[in-house]
Amino acid sequence: MLSAHLVFNRSGSPSQTEMDSWNNAGNFLQALKNSIQSLIMWSANPDINITPPTYTHRLLLSTWRIFGSKAVVKGLVDEVFNIQTQAQTSLSGTGSTELALDIVVTMISAPTAEAFTAEVTEVQTGVKINHNENIKNGNNGTTGSDGHIDTGRMSLSDALKYLASDTKMAMEEPQKMEIVVKLNRRVEQQMSVVSAGVRLQQNQHLAVIVDEVNGGMLDLMAVDGMSAL
């Protein structure tokens, strides 16, 4: 009975069934937008017996890897803008907009294995990380000619910063830029907590090294003392 469940491996890759369901929505990015709407509906009606949305973080990771971080962030901003427009049109207040902002901030701030490894490497080695999506896959994780480590994949938070500096959007779509600024500020607050955790990990790592060095020195001093006797 248990033989079929003996081999189990959890990963960030979706199953074929999940990919088929996301493709049926049009594409992965549209499925991600639909998930945001489902999460808002579920959160905005706590008293109604609604089945929780079948959201999985694998959807965001897969969309990020297929479309790239800039396209994903742009799609998330568009979805928040559409929800805000619908709320203003229906005079339903800003509740759904705030929920959309919270959900998107959580998605963008959620750590990934790639981003966390890159940040730890940057803190521990002092080598700047290049999150350049134009780098060929063969160069990922290598040191470029400028001495920086190339990851070949821009994080969602970096893509949001890039979008926040888009002067063209600020002039042509000021309402969307306002959403971008709000998201960027909230994401920076969330990411500051993550950075503090990385620094704590680095300090703990250094403390272990210091303890090992001190312990080695004490051993040598003990040996020297025994030799003197």
Image (cartoon, rainbow, N blue to C red):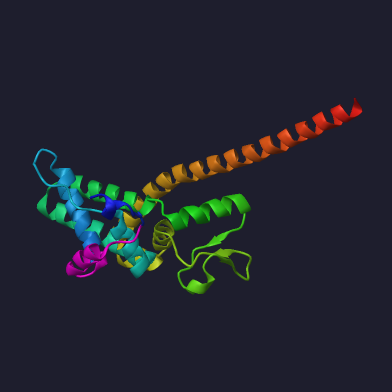
Query: In which quarter of the view is residue 74 placed?
Result: bottom left
Query: For the magenta stretch, what is the residue range?
Result: 12-29
Whether residue 135 is visible, yes or no, is no
Judged left or right of residue 102, residue 85 is left
Q: Please tell me whether residue 61 is drawn above or below residue 91 in the rendered image.
A: below
Is residue 26 on the magenta stretch?
yes
Q: Residue at x 41, y 54 (%)?
A: 112
Judged left or right of residue 126, residue 81 is left
Q: Please tell me whether residue 92 is drawn above or below residue 227 in the rendered image.
A: below
Between residue 7 and residue 91, name the one nearer to us: 7
Judged left or right of residue 66, residue 206 is right
Judged left or right of residue 149, residue 96 is left
Q: Residue 2, percent across and down?
A: 26, 49
Between residue 91 and residue 12, name the one nearer to us: 12
Between residue 185 and residue 55, name the one nearer to us: 55
Query: Can you name the residue that lies furthest to the left here?
Result: 48
Q: Residue at x 44, y 63 (%)?
A: 154
Whether residue 117 is visible, yes or no, is yes
Q: Residue 187, percent across and down?
A: 39, 49
Query: Can you name the residue that lies furthest to the top here?
Result: 229
Is residue 133 on the magenta stretch?
no
Quadrant for the C terminus in the image: top right
Q: Residue at x 10, y 38 (%)?
A: 47
Q: Residue 63, percent across and down?
A: 31, 64
Q: Residue 122, percent across and down?
A: 57, 54
Q: Please tell me whether residue 93 is drawn above or below residue 37 in the rendered image.
A: above
Query: In which quarter of the view is residue 83 placed?
Result: bottom left
Q: Residue at x 39, y 62 (%)?
A: 163
Q: How many circles with numbers are drawn on the protein?
A: 0
**What predominant SS class does the magenta segment belong to?**
helix
